[in-house]
């Protein structure tokens, strides 16, 4: 196989701060790869895992909510470890195809195979194994995709590029939900998501050259140094620490709301077709998100500010959770989905740009973004642990969404503690 065209910086620029703006083709291809990875995640998360949990729960002695919480929680632990691990490996990769591309290819291929295994699962143990493998491999690909941005995109273009990646992310949620709903069953849904995940990364890896890290730039290898690199002291890097915490809180709020959405429609609102209801809510959310995600990123680049956008987006998302808590009806849920999309559109693009602005070191971009991305994964562990007892013993869905609103508001307020970014 021949190498991709030479369309970017040389290997000598691997650790330099990028100054040359990337073109539309590069942004479009990377966004498509991001879309494909999120389809692989959210087809299962929105529909397929919940359907399997409902089928398998009667033979386990657990409720469907508890089984789903255990499977997604264990998978989130894998995600938590995998993202920074593969980010660090990609930082140190000196392959001819570059630092990031080999991991995008391997991760997408492994993700597709894992989704096919999930489609063939005959019980809860195979379901859990398949989801853990999907989290492992898809995180390898995603760590490399996100690290490509600070590798190639100058600071004052990262808001707009982050906007397109955010749009691809929500399209992945919509696409995954749509494929899972319309494919014609659990097995077919997983197969459709697997095919999309694999095919979606090809334009980027075949058309665009990655930056190769010169072998002499790679630090000497030792397991002790490698494992030690994952700890970043909040005292030495306070902006990085506060940025991580704010992202964690906002994502925890969002995870609490999304985890049991199918069950909320079925058991609390008694929606006549809850699967299609999830698809409708996802589409409403996507329309509002797409209306703001790129615009907010471009606007943030032009004014040179990040924090006001992230703060107000977090407040709007907290309001969305509050709407469901005080107005638990189908119209109220639609309004909440619209508000959530409005807020998350701004958050997805500008918060990503903010995160790339607080990275401590060029050599560790992939690892450091992986540590930040752990703020997306840990809520997947914490949310089931919080949500299951709240729904079962502590007041039900009204209390669940009230707690989500308070947590999201805390995340929005703490953005102000970041000092090195406007």
Image: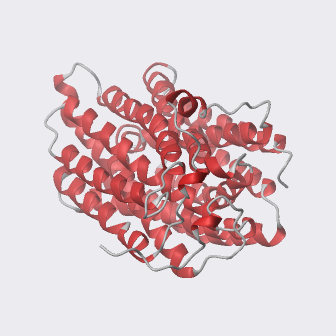
- Give residue 200's position: percent from left, percent from top: 36, 68
Count of picture labels: 0
Vertical side of 48 occupied by 126: above or below: above
Task: Name the residue: 70% across, 41% down.
Answer: 246
Q: Is residue 420 left or right of residue 135?
A: right
Question: Which sits in the foreground, 410 or 190?
Answer: 190
Picture layout, residue 148 above or below residue 393? below
Give percent across and percent down for residue 379.
53, 35
Residue at the image point whose x is 57% and y is 49% from the top: 366
Name, please, the residue furthest toward the front: 216
Question: Foreground: 135 or 289?
Answer: 135
Splitting the image into 4 quarters, where does residue 79 fall? top left
Q: Position of residue 104 (x, y in %)?
A: 41, 58
Q: In which image quadrant can residue 351 be found?
A: bottom right
Q: Which quarter of the rendered picture does the N terminus lie within?
A: bottom left
Foreground pick, 363 / 70:
363
Give the camera-side residue of 71 and 130: 130
Q: Is residue 342 left or right of residue 412?
A: left
User: In what quadrant of the picture does the C terminus appear?
Assistant: bottom right
**Residue at coordinates 67% horizontally, 47% vertically from top-left?**
319
Position of 262 compared to 326: left or right? left
Residue 320 in view here:
yes
């Amino acid at each position: 196989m021949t190498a991709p065209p030479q369309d970017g910086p040389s290997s000598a620029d691997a650790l330099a701060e990028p100054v040359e703006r990337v073109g539309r083709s590069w942004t479009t291809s990377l966004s498509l790869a991001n879309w494909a990875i999120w389809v692989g995640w959210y087809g299962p998360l929105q529909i397929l895992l919940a359907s399997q949990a409902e089928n398998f729960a009667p033979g386990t002695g657990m409720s469907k909510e508890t089984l789903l919480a255990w499977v997604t929680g264990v998978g989130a632990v894998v995600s938590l470890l995998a993202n920074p691990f593969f980010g660090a490996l990609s930082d140190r990769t000196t392959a001819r195809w570059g630092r990031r591309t080999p991991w995008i290819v391997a991760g997408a291929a492994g993700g597709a195979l894992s989704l096919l295994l999930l489609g063939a699962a005959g019980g809860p143990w195979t379901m859990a194994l398949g989801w853990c493998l999907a989290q492992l491999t898809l995180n390898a690909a995603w760590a490399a995709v996100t690290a490509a941005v600070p590798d190639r995109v100058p600071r004052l273009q990262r808001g707009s590029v982050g906007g397109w990646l955010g749009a691809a992310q929500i399209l992945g949620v919509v696409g995954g939900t749509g494929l899972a709903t319309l494919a014609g069953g659990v097995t077919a849904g997983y197969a459709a998501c697997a095919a999309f995940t694999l095919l979606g990364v090809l334009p980027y890896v075949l058309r665009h050259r990655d930056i190769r890290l010169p072998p002499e730039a790679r630090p000497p290898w030792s397991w002790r140094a490698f494992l030690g690199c994952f700890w970043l002291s909040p005292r030495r890097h306070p902006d990085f620490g506060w940025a991580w915490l704010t992202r964690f809180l906002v994502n925890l709020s969002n995870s609490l709301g999304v985890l049991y959405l199918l069950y909320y429609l079925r058991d609390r609102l008694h929606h006549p077709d809850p699967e299609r209801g999830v698809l409708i809510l996802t589409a409403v959310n996507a329309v509002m998100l797409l209306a703001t995600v790129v615009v907010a990123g471009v606007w943030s680049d032009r004014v040179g500010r990040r924090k006001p956008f992230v703060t107000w987006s977090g407040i709007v998302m907290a309001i969305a959770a509050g709407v469901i808590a005080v107005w638990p009806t189908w119209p109220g849920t639609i309004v909440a989905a619209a508000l959530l999309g409005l807020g998350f559109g701004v958050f997805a693009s500008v918060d990503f740009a903010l995160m790339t602005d607080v990275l401590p070191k060029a050599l560790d971009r992939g690892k450091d973004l992986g540590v930040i991305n752990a703020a997306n994964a840990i809520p997947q562990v914490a949310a089931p642990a919080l949500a299951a007892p709240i729904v079962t013993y502590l007041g039900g869905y009204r209390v669940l969404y009230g707690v989500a609103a308070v947590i999201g508001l805390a995340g929005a307020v703490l953005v102000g503690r970041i000092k090195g970014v406007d």
